[in-house]
Amino acid sequence: MNKGWLSRLVLPLLILAAPATAVRAQDASGPIMPAPYQTAWQDLEFGVILHFSTNTFLDREWGDGTAPAAVFNPTQFDPDQWMEAIRDSGARYVVLVAKHHDGFCLWPTGQTTYSIKSSPWKAGKGDIVGDVARAARKYGLKFGVYLSPWDRHDPRYREASAYDKYYNAELSELASNYGELVEFWLDGAGSEGHVYDFKKIIETLRTYQPNTVVFADTGLFEYADARWVGTESGSVDYENWNVIDRHGYRRWRPIEADTPLRKEHWFWHPKDEKSLKSLDELLDEYDRSVGHGAQFMLGVAPDNRGLLPAVDVARLKEFGDALRERYQTNLAYGVSASAPEMSAALDNDPDTFWSAPVGSHQAVLELNFDHPVRFDHALTMEWLNDGQHIQKYSIDAWDDTQQQWQPIVTGQAIGHKKIDSFPAVTASRVRLNILSSTSEAHIREFQLYDWGGAAPAQPAAEAPTAAASPSAPPQ
């Protein structure tokens, strides 16, 4: 993981091109739609990836495979403490790094002695993967694993076919012994010049885990289910379309945006308190990932005791509390709409949705309040089961003074979720104006909030009025 992301750019060279006839068959007419397990994964929105290995005990980010197994010896290992803090953060799933690039395995694999079997922890009888999986489920979190393809310890890595056999045997153990896996990470960091049999890797996984989302760079476009955002900033800085094209293939590949809780550090390091991100930084990353239709993947690292540091626990809870507080008061909940069927988009229930007229490419969802309301954020969700359709939209407020609609914010992609922020507006009529869609739009939720932004353009006493000047969507 970490600094090796750019090495993924070489991965497309390692994948065999599919015949043109296959590409045409896969890209038949009609929208590109997600698999049910992809939309279920997108609904999770926020996950945590856990780094805990020999690096934890050696003040390292990247191990070179020479660390003795004896260095791994947490004295207070408590995965329940991890999961309670992660649950409190608002996350819904965890991915454990079962093997990082140094090759050290956190489960008692039968494929190598370079694992916790050779460590003093629990006299070599422990199983970190199993303990973490059980704790995650105990706290209502889904569980997944990261198995690094790059291995700086095992000598078989030098010979592709021998290493493929070794890697697939490890994957079989993880995929068959630890229950349902919500996500499987394939990270190509450090893999320059090494040829993997990715087709076989995914076949191995799917034998045991047909509904696991495979995360990878777009270099593994044919085989993965989700794609890396392109940075470790936790931010989507471009229009987020779930369907992308890669050398002739068009696929539904939603984004996961990863970033560590401690700046630039995925593993724990001593005397590192200043790197902990502030609450405001975390909320900004959330808005730029989940709020741009992506998954937010936050890196969390236990220390060399096997515990999350107290300051990390406190910050995770503070983050979760702030997220929960945000969504306490949806101003649009239950408000009268311009048509009765539109209420399905105003009911705080993402399992219901409003559909625009069949075959339409424009539509309007209008809210009518019985008194003027102030708001500075809007949250919109598309129902994506038959594809992502909205291409351009605006959110408008009715200006009583000028007797016309004034755009508050405009945008393009909505996708799973879009959070728009703007200077505070006070109005009694608001609309979601779908300006262009590939087919009829489906809106799961349209919500309005006052999260304490700038003061309204007009005093509340002069309502109902709206800010006259539109603002750009957050960048």
Image: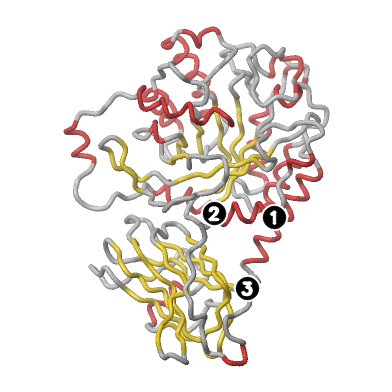
Residue 319 marker: 1
Residue 430 % position (x, y): 46, 80
Q: Residues within 10 Å of mark 1 (few under 14, many from 20)?
A: many
Which residue does the numbered mark 3 point to in the structure image? 454
Above-or-below relation of 250 to 175: below
Q: List the single residue furthest toward the left.
A: 21
Instruction: Measure how far apart labels 2 and 1 are at the Cα level.
Output: 15 Å
Q: Secondary structure at mark 1?
A: helix
Residue depicted at 37% across the width and 47% down the height: 35
Which one is in front, 161 or 420?
420
Residue 89 % position (x, y): 68, 52
Instruction: Measure how far apart labels 3 and 2 are at the Cα level.
Output: 19 Å
Residue depicted at 27% across the width and 63% down the height: 439
Q: Secondary structure at mark 3?
A: loop
Q: Residues within 10 Å of mark 2 (few under 14, many from 20)?
A: many
Mark 3 or 2, nearer chain start: 2
Residue type at numbered disc 3: Ala
Q: Residues within 10 Å of mark 3 (few under 14, many from 20)?
A: few
Residue 288 marker: 2
